[in-house]
Image (spheres, grey):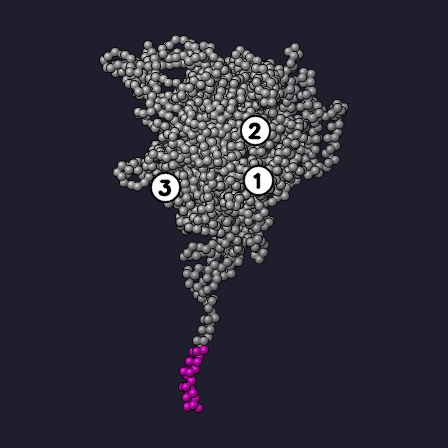
């Protein structure tokens, strides 16, 4: 999971990075003048932090856990599109929720929260996606998406507090990535796991201005580009067999078919971000050549982090199997280019050509399902190599793939050949010890493999000497088994061929070495800081660390050598990247050296560098498989260990050698898979001490050079086998069942004659018998006593009597053995008793047990007629009388005898365990032959290919074929061992796990060191045992150079167990330690006791305090120069009984110490064995001393103890490190004297309770100092004349300062004030309430402006519960609460807490002389422990982010209060449909403390039908608050007022409180001098110092009370406050379900009645009416064209209050030709408004079936839109303007000066003067309307409006009708004077003629008429002219 949100998550680092970015991550610079930190210059580079965070997501657990993801969608802005109906959808890991639809706006405000609950493993959850989409709900679904944003959960998880708070997301279109921003969405997201605290989603006060830019998350690179991942898949190899050979067998029988096939049909799957593509299937092929290109289209940069490669096996019938899975982190394959000189250094994902390795379950095929199949899915650590594939990845931007799969062209196939060049490697391993071996039934061998080479059970690989010889494990004398290799240590060698990628691995090794050195140095500095070294020494350590780091970072990274290495593009890029990083670190280190001022800050910086180094120390292209070591017993693989190849890789350059190469290391093998965890297997499979070396075959003389201590020898090996035939005796002929000469398994024939030395080798000497050493150890080896056993067997036929069976005597397995009396007693042993029948089992009185048939088993103690067999067990114990030295001597003797006896080993059958002495039952025997080989030619293939001529070359005879490659054995032989003695000083343990039901354990420790082990004594009933015991391991034989042992000593393994009388002892955990080695016993160093952490699997199991020394035993006969000529061993430690104690000098130094125990009481004790705990007493045990409290009579009446103080006078270690824990044990006193333990608590450390002893005579002074600062010597003189002077000053001060009279306190000038007070300012009274004080304190200033102007008191608002506030210390100052546990802690139990103990401790040194006077006790002046009756007031203010319980994503919460047996339910006042309710409720109860001390506030969800669900609850311990000295009963107010919103509410006045405080804390005082000055302790307080100006508030109280209150405020006391308490639900423990803000007041009745409670009722909304008169519109865009072609619009205006959404329209001004419209129309909008908070309250039902109205608080926004009316189509939208009545732009007086720039705009950020209509009451003028479909605002018109805001009362007094309806008044609206041209054409035909046709065409008409007249005249003229002329002529 590396790099989440790093390289690709640039989104997350967009602008935000640059915002917080600072140059040089050195420590802060301090300005010497001001002492302030100099802000660093910003720059755009912040890799450090991010790389550090990347780490978080690695190594995540795979265990499913409860998680909750909370998302709050706040608002959106500038969504693309004008008049849209937006809705937001949130999808988290396939769960989708959506917000409400908002009407007609592109800046919707939703403010809705969603909760997603998961039970998933963190590793899976971090890969899931969170996606935000915004849709336009009006459009069709297909194109309704406006924009989206997605990222993965891991990206959120990496942020501080695992959350994005109030971030703006840039929405983009996932399809069309080039189109840029589609709008902005503001959200909060957080991921909460168990125990995480949820951050508050409340808006921050300063966010009014809302700077989008600096808070913006962009999808990576804003422009998501389409891209293609092209995976070139060349080939794979070494794929294991996956199918059964059934069909092959069938074909062979019928003679069909061809040669043997590989039984696997692989294909390759490539997947990323949910998409996958697969290759073709290659049938019957375990080395497929796919040569295909697989492509996946993605949006780049992607938020997903891992590429996944899977090789699957195709099956015809069943589901395809997974062969292996490999994940490739994207962050290692690409870079965004933020490092390096320029952005061109970034690169797209690229990889290879390189092999990737697959790991998973073991390779051996079985037809049965494998229990480790999960490992093939990539879950957990793969235990075996399962093949590798050669791949190459490239990324192309800007295109998506057309076809997902195509073939690779031949050029590429040829090009990749050079990457497949192989070289020979050799892997050497020498095994020095195998201890703690768990497999004891069959011989054990270890196999070393790399890739598939060396895999013994795989038939396809050539055999090689990859396994040690099979050896029987031998008992070590105490508990464990080891392999007795003594001086001949087995070695193995594996030859393999791999590509030479040493340049990659060497670079990785160099970085890992730098990291190791740095970590070791950091640890040293840390120890220095812990040990509180003086600063110069620390600085010295730090400087040397930095010098070393700089020097390391300057080392050269290895480069690929041409001709030897073939590097690819990613190698080059990675190298540049690493070089740049190292250079940067080196430069930063130099700066840090010069500028560092503080060690801790510098260390933080260094840890940052360490994180960067760890991030670059990863090699994505590591194609060399890991080395795997397996422990094999018989044919079964039991346990493994995996070592990355680079760690053991050899290199010529010492800087590049792997850190474990050739070095002696101790490995603790692991069981494969999750088996050990699931089955709770506690044992270690085996511990190995081994050396491993990997390097090129031609460099392996480096390995031989390292073996200076012993001689490496190579032997050919074969076994001679014989069987025992009656009469004939031992013979090689007959039914052997295996060849006469064979390997150890008997699988292949290896005759001695056919061995030939390989080329370059020759024989030395002849064949000789070499018996296996472990045979020489009898089954009783290592035992001090041994029980011989044998079974007497009887049988019968039906109806006959019992008689001896055919095998009269057998062992427990049923194998025949000699009769009991002929069992021989070995020399050195004596019988302890005679043979006895074992009656301690399920047998009858004679010891018989019966069954039907002995081979079937199933024995029972009762005889039935059908039973035909019976047996009884005889046992006899023998005891060893010789000591170990004689035994060794005897062994050597035996060994010689054995060798004389020809080295045979015997067994009943070949597959059973062999033993050294012949027994009567043995039917077979064998012996081992060796012949030594010597190398003549350096580097010759010594180990393999001992070819010899097989008799037949038949293919079928596989055995001979195998034998032709038989492998030799190799040993590292040592001349003689060195003797050592190990002393283990086991002092004590603490906080062990409980093993028994009582909650205790009977622990003992078992130590294993090499071939010996030993146990401590057991300690009864303790979790913190002190053994104080030295265990001595004598005669340890260790082979090898003592100096090497000193450098790298073997580990001591310590295991702790709980002793159980019955059943096996329970495992409590283990730890490892390394002994201090002393080659010279006179060495003066002393080992120091250290705490070693104990762990059991994943859980923490306490700590062990111990030390270990390993001495080299000097040899008396050694020469003076040799190592062994040292002085004698140190004396043995003193004894106590039979046991050695821890010697002085090592054991802790003791001093006389007092522990005072305040034993106050027990609380909430749960039932024990079904009955209540009523009469408990407590036992305290520390360092072996026990004190017991008295018994409480009845916890029901008073759960406190009557005698509270217990006193220990004990010897305890002086050093805190060694302090024993305090064990607290609660017992209940029951009838019949039973005293069961009902609860325990182990207090690990008493350090926090240490204090100095109280000196009797100085007590007064000391305490006096606490009361306040000491004023110095001359305080006394002042006191005398203080009062008089004080008054004078006070009288003078008023006029001098020249304040207006009004500000004098009312008490001093009562007369002047009376008149004022009778007529309070009405606004002030209404707007100043308790909520004003609350909002002023939370910084929500817009909700309490008046209150702040008046400058009145604020309260503390804590964002956590009061117990967590710093100075309260959880109210543990008087007594602490200790949780009591019980019994074994079973994991599935919800909680093991069974009660609480209230008490305290004080620890201080006592004078060493018992006769000296004791210091006085610390616990004095205790309050009474009798119950006290109190009044409790619970104020619940509001809820925050409740977990919704209804499907709507909301809840209907109400409060339930539980205190003791009282319950108050406020179900009737539930708050409908909200998860952020404002309760504003106060509850008053009475209670008896401490009997009923736990106050539970529970929030429930109201349901009509089902029962109400619990949302969450919180519990407050009232008793702690009541007892605490910080006085948490009632918070101190800021000022003492006798009336008003800050009226004093406590039951006692400040002066009385001050007196009580002084008494309780032994402070002298208070002494008042007049009313204006007081002395407390040694300090004098004057009222004038606290109130330089007179109080403003008219309600203040008397001066002395005010002064006392000011003094109290200087003391550590709880002030008036509001606490925020998280709620938890038992169903999802540990996951917060929301928070409530509240506080509690406690008033003891004995102190009198309390003051009046605060009124915290929620603010009520006032009803207002908004009247808007739309007078005219001007310059509206003309949208239509008339028939006659003119531009015109039919204008009308629409308006509504957003949120209420009841729209009103004017009538239509038809046919406006110049954009002018006249309306004189009135809109009337009634709404409710909370003036103090400046929000509008909207109540409406969500759906028609909803029961309740949902209340929303919204900004009072009025939306005015201008539309064009169309009769036959949809109306056209012209423009809009949205005005916030609280902050609206001033209108323009003239239409000409009305512009879009008058309106505020977030993108341009232009400043505009804003006014509030609530203050102005009336506005008139022009406002612009605009359209922003295109994304920019264009002016589309101007509206002349008049707005008037009136209250409901005024509205009734001055009524006005809507539109132009009656009552048309205030003001009266005349019908608009519209031009004649304004009408609807088809309703008025005459007007149409007049105004449309005539108006447009009148000149045509007139012209036409004139023309007509002229034409008529002409016509008439022409018509009448001839006649007239003729007439005229005639008449002429």
Q: Give the prevailing secondary structure in the magenta stretch.
A: helix
Name the disc covering residue 1131, or none: none
Disc with the residue nearer the chain's start (2 vs 3): 3
Q: Secondary structure at mark 1?
A: helix
Give the residue drawn at x 56%, y 56%.
1791
Along the viewing direction, whichever of 933 and 1297 lies nearer the viewer: 933
Quickly name the residue at label 3: 285
Q: Are marks 2 and 3 in contact (CB under 8 Å)?
A: no
Residue 619 lies, in percent from the top left, at 51, 40
Identify the image quadrant of residue 931.
Answer: top left
Q: Which residues are magenta?
A: 1910-1932
**SS at badge 3:** loop
Within 10 Å of disc 1 (Cα), the crowding (few <14, some 14-19, many 20+) is some
Residue drawn at point x = 52 percent, y = 51 percent: 1777
Which of the marked residues, 1 or 2, is nearer the chain's N terminus? 1
Q: Residue furthest left?
A: 799
Viewer-nearest residue: 1917 or 48: 48
**SS type, badge 2:** helix
Name the front one of labels 3 and 1.
3
Residue 1921 lies in the magenta-colored region: yes
Which residue is rendered at x = 57% and y = 55% of the image?
1794
Q: Quadrant of residue 462?
A: top left
Disc number at residue 48? Answer: 1
Q: Nearer the viewer, mark 1 or mark 2?
A: 1
CA–CA distance in space, label 2 to label 3:
66 Å
Q: Nearer the viewer, residue 796 or 1244?
A: 796
Dot 2 corresponds to which residue? 1364
- Residue, x 54% and y 36% (percent of image)? 657
């Amino acid at each position: 999971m590396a790099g989440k949100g790093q390289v690709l998550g640039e989104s997350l680092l967009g602008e935000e990075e640059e915002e917080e970015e600072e140059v040089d991550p050195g420590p802060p610079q301090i300005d010497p003048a001001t002492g302030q930190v100099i802000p660093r210059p910003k720059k755009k580079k912040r890799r450090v932090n991010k790389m550090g965070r990347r780490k978080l997501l690695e190594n995540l657990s795979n265990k499913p856990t409860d998680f909750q993801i909370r998302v709050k969608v706040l608002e959106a802005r500038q969504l693309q599109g004008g008049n849209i109906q937006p809705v937001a959808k949130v999808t988290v890991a396939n769960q989708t929720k959506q917000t409400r639809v908002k009407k007609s706006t592109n800046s919707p405000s939703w403010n809705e929260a969603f909760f997603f609950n998961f039970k998933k493993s963190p590793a899976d959850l971090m890969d899931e996606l969170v996606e935000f989409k915004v849709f336009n709900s009006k459009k069709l679904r297909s194109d309704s998406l406006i924009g989206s944003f997605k990222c993965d959960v891991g990206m959120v998880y990496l942020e501080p507090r695992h959350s994005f708070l109030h971030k703006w997301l840039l929405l983009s279109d996932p399809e069309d990535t080039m189109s840029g921003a589609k709008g902005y969405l503001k959200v909060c997201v957080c991921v909460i796991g168990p125990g995480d605290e949820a951050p508050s989603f409340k808006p921050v006060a300063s966010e009014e201005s809302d700077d989008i830019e600096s808070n913006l998350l962009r999808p990576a690179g804003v422009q998501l580009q389409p891209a293609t991942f092209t995976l070139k898949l060349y080939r794979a190899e070494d794929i294991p067999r996956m199918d059964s050979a059934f069909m092959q067998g069938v074909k062979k029988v019928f003679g069909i078919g061809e040669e043997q096939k590989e039984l696997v049909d692989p294909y390759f799957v490539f997947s990323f971000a949910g998409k996958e593509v697969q290759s073709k299937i290659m049938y019957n092929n375990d080395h497929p050549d796919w040569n295909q290109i697989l492509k996946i289209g993605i949006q780049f940069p992607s938020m997903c982090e891992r590429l996944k490669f899977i090789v699957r096996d195709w099956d015809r019938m069943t589901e395809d199997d997974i062969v292996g899975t490999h994940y490739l982190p994207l962050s290692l394959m690409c870079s965004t280019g933020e490092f390096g000189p320029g952005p061109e250094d970034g690169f797209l994902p690229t990889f290879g050509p390189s092999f990737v390795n697959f790991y998973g379950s073991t390779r051996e095929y079985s037809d049965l399902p494998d229990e480790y199949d999960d490992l093939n899915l990539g879950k957990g650590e793969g235990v075996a190599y399962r093949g590798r594939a050669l791949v190459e990845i490239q990324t192309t931007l800007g295109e998506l793939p057309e076809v997902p799969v195509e073939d690779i062209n031949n050029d590429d196939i040829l090009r990749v050949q050079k990457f497949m060049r192989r070289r020979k490697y050799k892997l050497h391993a020498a095994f020095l010890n195998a201890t703690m071996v768990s497999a004891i039934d069959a011989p054990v061998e270890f196999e070393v493999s790399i890739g598939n080479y060396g895999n013994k059970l795989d038939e396809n690989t050539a055999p090689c000497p990859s396994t040690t010889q099979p050896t029987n494990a031998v008992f070590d004398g105490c508990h464990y088994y080891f392999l007795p290799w003594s001086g001949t240590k087995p070695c193995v060698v594996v030859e393999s061929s791999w590509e030479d990628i040493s340049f990659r691995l060497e670079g990785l090794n160099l970085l890992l070495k730098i990291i190791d050195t740095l970590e070791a140095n950091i640890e040293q500095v840390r120890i220095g800081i812990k040990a509180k070294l003086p600063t110069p020494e620390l600085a010295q350590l730090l400087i040397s660390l930095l010098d070393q780091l700089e020097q390391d970072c300057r080392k050269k990274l290895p480069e690929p050598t041409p001709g030897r290495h073939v590097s690819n593009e990613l190698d080059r890029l990675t190298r540049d990247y690493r070089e740049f990083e190292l250079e940067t670190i080196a430069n930063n280190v130099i700066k840090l050296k010069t500028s560092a001022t503080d060690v801790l800050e510098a260390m933080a910086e260094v840890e940052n560098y360490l994180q960067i180094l760890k991030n670059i120390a990863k090699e994505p292209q590591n194609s060399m498989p890991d080395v795997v070591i397996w422990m094999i017993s018989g044919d079964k693989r039991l346990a493994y260990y995996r070592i990355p190849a680079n760690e053991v890789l050899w290199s010529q350059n010492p800087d590049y050698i792997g850190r474990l190469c050739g070095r002696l290391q101790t490995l603790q093998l692991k069981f494969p898979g999750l088996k050990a965890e699931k089955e709770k297997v506690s044992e270690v499979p085996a511990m190995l001490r081994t050396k491993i070396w990997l390097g090129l075959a031609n460099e392996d003389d480096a390995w031989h050079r390292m073996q200076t201590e012993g001689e490496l020898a190579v032997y050919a090996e074969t076994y001679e086998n014989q069987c025992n035939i009656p009469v004939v005796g031992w013979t090689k002929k007959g039914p052997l069942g295996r060849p006469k000469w064979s390997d150890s398994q008997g699988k292949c024939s290896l005759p001695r004659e056919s061995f030939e030395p390989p080329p370059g080798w020759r024989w030395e000497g002849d064949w000789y018998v070499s018996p296996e050493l472990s045979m020489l150890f009898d089954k009783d080896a290592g035992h001090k006593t041994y029980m011989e056993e044998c079974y007497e067997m009887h049988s019968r036929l039906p109806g006959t009597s019992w008689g001896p069976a055919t095998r009269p005597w057998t062992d427990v397995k049923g194998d025949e053995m000699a009769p009991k009396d002929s069992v021989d007693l070995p020399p050195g042993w004596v019988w302890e008793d005679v043979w006895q029948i074992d009656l301690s089992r399920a047998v009858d009185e004679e010891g018989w047990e019966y069954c039907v048939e002995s081979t079937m088993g199933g024995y029972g103690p009762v005889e039935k007629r059908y039973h035909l067999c019976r047996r009884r067990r005889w046992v006899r114990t023998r005891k060893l009388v010789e000591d170990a030295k004689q035994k060794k001597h005897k062994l050597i003797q035996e060994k010689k005898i054995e060798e004389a006896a020809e080295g045979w080993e015997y067994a009943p059958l070949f597959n059973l365990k062999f033993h050294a002495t012949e027994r009567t039952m043995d039917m077979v025997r064998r012996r081992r032959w060796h012949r030594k080989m010597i190398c003549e030619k350096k580097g010759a293939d010594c180990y393999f290919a001992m070819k010899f001529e097989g008799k037949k070359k038949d293919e079928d005879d596989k055995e001979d074929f195998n034998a032709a490659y038989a492998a030799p054995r190799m040993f590292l032989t040592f001349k003689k061992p060195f003797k050592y003695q190990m002393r283990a000083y086991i002092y004590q343990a603490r906080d062990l796990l409980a093993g028994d039901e009582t909650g205790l354990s009977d622990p003992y420790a078992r130590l294993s060191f090499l071939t010996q082990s030993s146990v401590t004594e057991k300690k009864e009933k303790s979790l913190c045992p002190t053994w104080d015991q030295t265990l001595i391991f004598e005669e340890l034989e260790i082979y090898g150079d003592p100096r090497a042992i000193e450098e790298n000593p073997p580990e001591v393994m310590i295991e702790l167990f709980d002793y159980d009388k019955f059943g096996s002892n329970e495992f409590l955990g283990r730890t490892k330690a390394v002994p201090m080695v002393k080659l010279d016993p006179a060495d003066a160093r002393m080992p120091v006791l250290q705490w070693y952490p104990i762990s059991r699997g994943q859980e923490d199991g306490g700590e062990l305090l111990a030390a270990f020394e390993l001495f080299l035993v000097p040899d008396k006969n050694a020469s003076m120069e040799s190592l062994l000529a040292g002085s004698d061993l140190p004396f043995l430690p003193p004894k106590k009984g039979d046991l050695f104690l821890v010697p002085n000098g090592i054991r802790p130094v003791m001093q006389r110490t007092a522990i005072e125990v305040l034993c106050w009481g027990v609380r909430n004790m749960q039932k024990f064995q079904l009955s209540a705990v009523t009469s408990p007493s407590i036992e305290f045990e520390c360092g072996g001393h026990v004190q017991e409290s008295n018994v409480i009579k009845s916890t029901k009446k008073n759960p406190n103890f009557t005698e509270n103080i217990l006193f220990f006078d004990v010897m305890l270690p002086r050093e805190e490190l060694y302090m024993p824990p305090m064990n607290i044990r609660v017992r209940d006193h029951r009838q019949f004297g039973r005293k069961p333990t009902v609860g325990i608590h182990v207090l690990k450390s008493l350090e926090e309770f240490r204090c100095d002893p109280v000196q009797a005579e100085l007590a007064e002074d000391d305490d006096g100092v606490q009361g306040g600062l000491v004023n110095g010597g001359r305080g006394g003189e002042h006191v005398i004349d203080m009062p008089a002077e004080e008054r004078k000053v006070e009288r003078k001060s008023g006029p001098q300062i020249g304040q207006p009279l009004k500000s004098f306190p009312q008490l001093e000038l009562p007369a002047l004030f009376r008149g004022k007070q009778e007529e309070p300012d009405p606004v002030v009274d209404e707007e100043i309430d308790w909520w004003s004080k609350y909002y002023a304190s939370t910084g929500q200033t817009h909700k309490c402006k008046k209150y702040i102007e008046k400058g009145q008191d604020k309260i503390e608002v804590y964002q956590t519960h009061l117990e967590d506030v710093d100075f309260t210390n959880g109210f543990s100052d008087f007594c602490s609460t200790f949780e009591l546990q019980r019994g074994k802690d079973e994991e599935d139990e919800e909680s093991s807490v069974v009660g609480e103990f209230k008490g305290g401790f004080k620890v201080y040194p006592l004078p060493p002389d018992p006769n000296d006077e004791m210091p006085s006790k610390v616990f004095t002046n205790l309050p009474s422990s009798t119950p006290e009756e109190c009044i409790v007031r619970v104020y619940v203010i509001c809820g925050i982010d409740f977990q919704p319980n209804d499907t709507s994503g909301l809840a209907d919460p109400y409060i339930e209060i539980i205190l003791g047996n009282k319950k108050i339910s406020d179900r009737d006042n539930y708050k409908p449909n909200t998860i952020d309710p404002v309760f504003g409720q106060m509850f008053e109860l009475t209670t008896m403390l401490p009997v009923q001390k736990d106050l539970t506030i529970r929030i429930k969800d109201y349901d009509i039908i089902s029962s109400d669900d619990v949302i969450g609850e919180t519990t407050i311990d009232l008793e702690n608050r009541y007892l605490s000295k910080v006085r948490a009963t009632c918070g101190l107010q800021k000022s003492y007022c006798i009336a008003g919103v800050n009226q004093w509410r406590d039951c006692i006045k400040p002066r009385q409180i001050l007196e009580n405080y002084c008494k309780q804390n032994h402070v002298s005082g208070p002494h008042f001098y007049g009313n204006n000055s007081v002395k407390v302790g040694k300090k004098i307080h004057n009222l004038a110092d606290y109130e330089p100006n007179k109080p403003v508030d008219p309600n203040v109280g008397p001066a002395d009370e005010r002064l006392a209150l000011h003094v109290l405020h200087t003391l550590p006391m709880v002030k008036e406050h509001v606490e925020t308490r998280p709620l938890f639900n038992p169903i999802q423990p540990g996951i917060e379900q929301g928070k409530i803000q509240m506080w509690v007041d406690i008033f003891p009745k004995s102190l009198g009645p309390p003051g009046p409670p605060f009124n915290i009722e929620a603010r009520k909304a006032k009803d207002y009416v908004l009247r808007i008169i739309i007078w005219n519109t001007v310059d509206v865009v003309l949208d239509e064209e008339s028939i006659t072609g003119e531009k015109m619009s039919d204008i009308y205006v629409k308006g509504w209050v957003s949120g209420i959404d009841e729209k009103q329209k004017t009538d239509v001004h038809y046919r406006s030709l110049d954009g002018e419209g006249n309306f004189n129309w009135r809109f009337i909008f009634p709404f409710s408004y909370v003036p103090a908070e400046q929000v509008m309250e909207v109540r409406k039902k969500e759906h028609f079936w909803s029961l309740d109205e949902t209340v929303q608080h919204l900004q009072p926004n009025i939306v005015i839109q201008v539309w064009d009316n169309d009769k036959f189509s949809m109306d056209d939208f012209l423009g809009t303007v949205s005005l916030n009545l609280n902050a609206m732009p001033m209108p323009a007086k003239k239409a000409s000066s009305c512009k879009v720039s008058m309106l505020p705009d977030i993108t341009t950020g232009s400043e505009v003067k804003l006014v509030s209509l609530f203050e102005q009451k009336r506005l008139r003028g022009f406002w612009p309307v605009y359209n922003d479909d295109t994304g920019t605002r264009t002016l589309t018109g101007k509206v002349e409006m008049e707005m008037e805001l009136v209250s409901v009362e005024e509205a009734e007094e001055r009524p006005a009708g809507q539109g132009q309806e009656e009552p048309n008044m205030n003001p009266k609206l005349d019908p608009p004077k519209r031009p004649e041209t304004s009408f609807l054409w088809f309703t008025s035909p005459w007007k149409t003629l007049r105004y449309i046709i005539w108006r447009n065409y009148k000149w045509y008409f007139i012209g036409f008429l004139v023309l007509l007249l002229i034409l008529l005249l002409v016509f008439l003229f022409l018509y009448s002219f001839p006649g007239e002329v003729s007439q005229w002529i005639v008449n002429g």
